[in-house]
Structures are given as structure tokens and as C-alpha cells.
Image: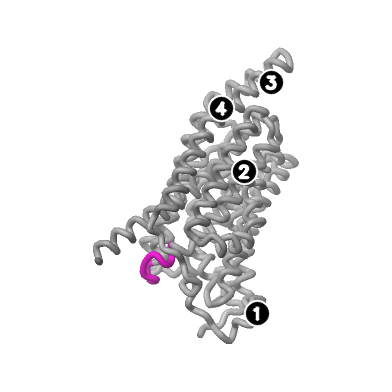
């Protein structure tokens, strides 16, 4: 019987790990899509970063409806539904590619984000309840590694197809004799995306079927957050730290997406060939994986999650200033190394924001998921600043973000919180 339970636990953990891998794989494709669509659809920086806007704003739209959907479907069927919605988003890329229509691409990205929002709302609680509560933080870090390893691989795989010889294509476009020749080149470039997204669609559908057939348990409401504080449950607005945490998530996701999704374009602006720059997103994600491994080793035995968040915020401040004041590859390394600063922010901010919420846990979690919209707005602001100033100077917006996260780590997470 015990052996059977262990097998069921291992299978469940493996399947949830696969889902976190899918999160990372799809999410971090955006870093490759931005320079690809910028060329294929003839966009400026501001327009190109609507890629991140369309993808991440869906979390804001879908965070609260996701909970209602999961109440009707149950968590397991909800996960399968999320995967199917993501597959639909991938299919939309096919007509978008053949028509070279940027609006269709954005609709596809928004649809993928809707599916991911359902999937994440359903999947995150499983990490906590699949094993002992005291080892939940370690499981979160392990899932983070699965997520970020996928993030390392996805831009490398997609970039090898989409960005292959793109500098040469850009040169041919600039020398095209007439509009017809230019359109032919652009159409050929745009259609590179078709086969990868057909493959991704098939993978998502297969995984949706596997989840339906899996032994994953259903969650009961009381399993999600047992540490209620009865006297504080009369109003969610008394939990000031939750709202400050939601803002921290908003800002953190914004700078994380900026670091990962702008680095290829930034490298190109510094004069790096695209054949080299296309790997810079993977460098950022490699730094995040290193941070997750450190988190598994250090937390909570050596340092607390509060201390980890303080250290990450300070590292973020130092490195973001480094991006601005250094040049060439040193500036790229500073930007990529921000992955190390970001690695422990989500695992730290999430529990610090949800502690003691009791019956408000689901609402609190929905607020934090809505905060992922930071990935929609901050890169768009960066793109606008990059057009009116220059790409390097635009990274100045990162500094106040890390200062706020430092404030949350020191004081913000305690405002309005009372221990039992």
C-alpha cells in the first residue's frame, strides 16, 4: 500500500513538473518572438513589446474567472481545459503567419495567456499539498527549476528556426528592389513559425489527455491555506500586506520579463550579431536556475525567505545600475545576471503575501495572479522609453522597482499582519 502511494506521489509530482515545464517553455518563447515579429511585421520597439502586453494582460483578465471555472470543472479537468485553450492560441499563429498579421499574433498570444492563467491557478496549490508542508518550499524551488530549464531550452530551440540568418534577411530586406520582392522575403520569414507551433499544439493536446487520465487528486478547500486567523477574517482590506504583496508581484514580474524578453533586442542594439544575441535570454534563465538551486540549499535552514528577498532586491539594484553605467558585453552580463536576483522573488513574495488569510486565500491568490500583468505593462513602458531615448537608458525604470521590493521585504510584508 505504501509503495502504491509512493508511486502515485511520484507520478503526480512528475505530471505537475511537466506542467511547470510547459509554463516556462511557452512563457519564455516571447523573448524570441519579439525580435522575430519586429522584423517580420516591420515594428518599432514600442509596437514589438505588445507581444508581452498581449500575453501577460490575459492574467489580469482571467485571474478571477479562473477560480469560478475551476469550481465548475474541478482542478484536474481545469488543467486539461487550460492546456486546450493554450493549444487554440498556438493554432491561431498559423493563419497569423500566412497573412503576416500582427493583430492575429497578438490574439494568439492573449489566448495562450488565458489558458496559462487557468493552468497556473489550478496547478500552484498542488505543489503545496502533494507532500509534507515543511518541504513545500523545496518543491516550489524544484518546480521553478523545471520552469526555468524549459525557459533556457525554448528560446534556443525556437531561435534556431525563427532567427536563423536573420541578419542576412534584414540586409536583403534593406536592399530589396521593390515592394513585391520585400513582401516575398517577409512572407517567407513569417511562415517559419508554422511548423514549430503545429508541433507545440500537438504536445499541448497530448498532455491535456494525459492529465485527464492521471491519478492527480482533487483539492479540498480546506487544504489550500489552513493557517486562518479568525479575528482578522472580517475584511480582506485589513490585510494590507496582501495588497503590498500584489504590487510587489506586479513590479517583480515586470522587471523579470524585461530582463528576459528585451535582452535579445538590447544585444542587437549594442551591435551583437543576432546569431549570438539570440542566446542571451537563455543566459538570463540559466542565472535564474542557479538562484533556484541556491534557494533549495539555503532556505530555510540558513537564511529565511525574508532575508532572501532582501538580498535579491539589493542585487537587483546593483545590477540594474550596472546595466546602465557599463558598456558592451559587461552590460549584457549585468542584465542577464538579474536572473539570479529574480530567482527567489516569487517563492518569497507569494507566501509572505498569503500568510494568515484563511478564507480569503483564494481571493488573495487571484490578486497575486492579477499582478502578473506587470509583465504586460513594464516592458511596454520600456519599449516606449527605448524609442524616445535609447535602449540602455530605458533600463533606469528597474531601479525604483527593486527599491520597492526591498521595502516590502523589510517592512511591507508586516503591515496589517498579526500572528495567531
Q: Residue at x 56, y 76 (%)?
A: 359
Q: Earlier in the sequence, mark 4 or mark 3?
A: 3
Circle 4 residues within 10 Å: few <14, some 14–19, many ≥20 = some
Q: What residue span does the magenta drawing correspond to? A: 127-135
Q: Is residue 96 above or below residue 305?
A: above
Circle 3 residues within 10 Å: few <14, some 14–19, many ≥20 = some
Q: Is residue 340 above or below residue 223?
A: above
Q: CA distance from mark 4 to mark 1?
A: 52 Å
Q: Residue at x 45, y 43 (%)?
A: 206
Residue on which disc 1 sits? 235
Foreground pick, 415 / 138: 138
Q: CA distance from mark 4 to mark 3?
A: 14 Å
Image quadrant of residue 141?
A: bottom left
- Per the picture, the main secondary structure of the magenta-coloured stretch is helix
Q: Residue at x 47, y 70 (%)?
A: 220
Residue 179 position, x and y percent, is 73, 17
Image quadrant of residue 188?
A: top right
Q: Residue at x 60, y 49 (%)?
A: 113
Circle 2 residues within 10 Å: few <14, some 14–19, many ≥20 = many
Q: Earlier in the sequence, mark 1 or mark 3?
A: 3
> Does the magenta portion include 27?
no
Q: Do callouts 1 and 3 mark residues in contact (Cβ within 8 Å)?
A: no
Q: Earlier in the sequence, mark 2 or mark 3?
A: 2
Q: Do callouts 4 and 1 mark residues in contact (Cβ within 8 Å)?
A: no
Residue on which disc 2 sits? 109
Q: Do callouts 4 and 3 mark residues in contact (Cβ within 8 Å)?
A: no
Residue on which disc 4 sits? 192
Residue 228 position, x and y percent, is 52, 80
Foreground pick, 157 / 330: 157
Local secondary structure at mark 2: helix
Residue 183: which numbered mark, if any? 3
Amino acid at each position: 500500500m505504501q509503495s502504491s502511494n509512493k508511486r502515485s506521489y511520484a507520478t503526480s509530482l512528475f505530471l505537475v513538473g511537466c506542467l511547470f515545464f510547459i509554463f516556462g517553455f511557452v512563457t519564455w518563447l516571447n523573448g524570441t518572438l519579439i525580435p522575430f515579429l519586429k522584423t517580420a511585421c516591420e515594428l518599432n520597439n514600442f509596437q514589438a513589446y505588445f507581444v508581452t502586453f498581449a500575453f501577460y494582460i490575459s492574467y489580469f483578465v482571467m485571474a478571477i474567472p479562473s477560480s469560478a471555472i475551476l469550481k465548475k470543472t474541478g482542478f484536474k479537468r481545469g488543467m486539461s481545459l487550460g492546456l486546450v485553450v493554450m493549444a487554440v492560441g498556438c493554432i491561431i499563429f498559423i493563419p497569423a503567419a500566412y497573412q503576416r498579421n500582427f493583430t492575429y499574433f497578438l490574439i494568439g498570444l492573449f489566448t495562450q495567456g488565458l489558458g496559462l492563467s487557468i493552468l497556473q491557478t489550478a496547478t500552484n496549490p498542488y505543489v503545496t499539498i502533494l507532500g509534507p508542508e515543511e518541504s513545500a518550499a523545496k518543491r516550489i524551488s524544484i518546480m521553478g527549476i523545471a520552469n526555468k530549464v524549459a525557459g533556457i531550452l525554448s528560446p534556443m530551440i525556437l531561435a534556431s528556426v525563427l532567427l536563423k540568418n536573420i541578419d542576412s534577411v534584414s540586409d536583403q530586406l534593406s536592399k530589396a528592389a521593390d515592394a513585391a520582392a520585400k513582401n516575398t522575403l517577409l512572407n517567407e520569414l513569417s511562415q517559419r513559425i508554422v511548423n514549430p507551433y503545429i508541433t507545440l499544439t500537438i504536445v499541448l493536446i497530448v498532455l491535456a489527455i494525459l492529465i485527464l487520465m492521471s491519478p492527480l487528486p482533487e483539492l479540498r478547500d480546506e487544504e489550500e491555506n489552513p493557517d486562518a486567523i479568525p479575528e482578522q477574517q472580517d475584511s480582506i482590506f485589513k490585510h494590507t500586506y496582501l495588497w503590498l504583496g500584489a504590487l510587489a508581484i506586479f513590479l517583480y514580474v515586470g522587471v523579470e520579463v524585461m530582463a528576459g524578453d528585451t535582452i535579445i533586442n538590447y544585444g542587437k542594439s549594442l551591435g551583437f550579431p543576432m546569431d549570438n544575441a539570440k542566446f542571451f535570454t537563455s543566459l538570463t534563465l540559466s542565472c535564474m536556475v542557479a538562484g533556484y538551486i541556491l534557494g533549495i540549499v539555503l532556505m530555510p535552514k540558513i537564511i529565511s525567505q525574508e532575508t532572501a528577498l532582501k538580498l535579491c532586491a539589493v542585487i537587483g539594484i546593483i545590477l540594474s545600475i550596472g546595466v546602465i553605467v557599463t558598456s558592451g558585453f559587461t552590460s549584457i552580463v549585468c542584465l542577464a545576471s538579474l536572473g539570479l536576483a529574480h530567482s527567489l522573488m516569487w517563492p518569497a513574495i507569494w507566501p509572505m503575501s498569503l500568510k494568515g488569510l484563511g478564507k480569503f486565500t483564494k481571493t488573495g491568490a487571484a490578486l497575486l495572479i492579477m499582478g502578473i500583468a506587470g509583465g504586460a505593462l513594464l516592458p511596454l513602458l520600456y519599449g516606449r522609453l527605448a524609442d524616445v531615448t535609447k535602449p540602455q537608458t530605458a533600463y533606469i525604470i528597474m531601479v525604483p522597482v527593486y527599491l520597492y521590493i526591498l521595502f516590502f521585504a523589510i517592512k511591507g510584508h508586516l503591515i496589517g499582519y498579526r500572528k495567531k
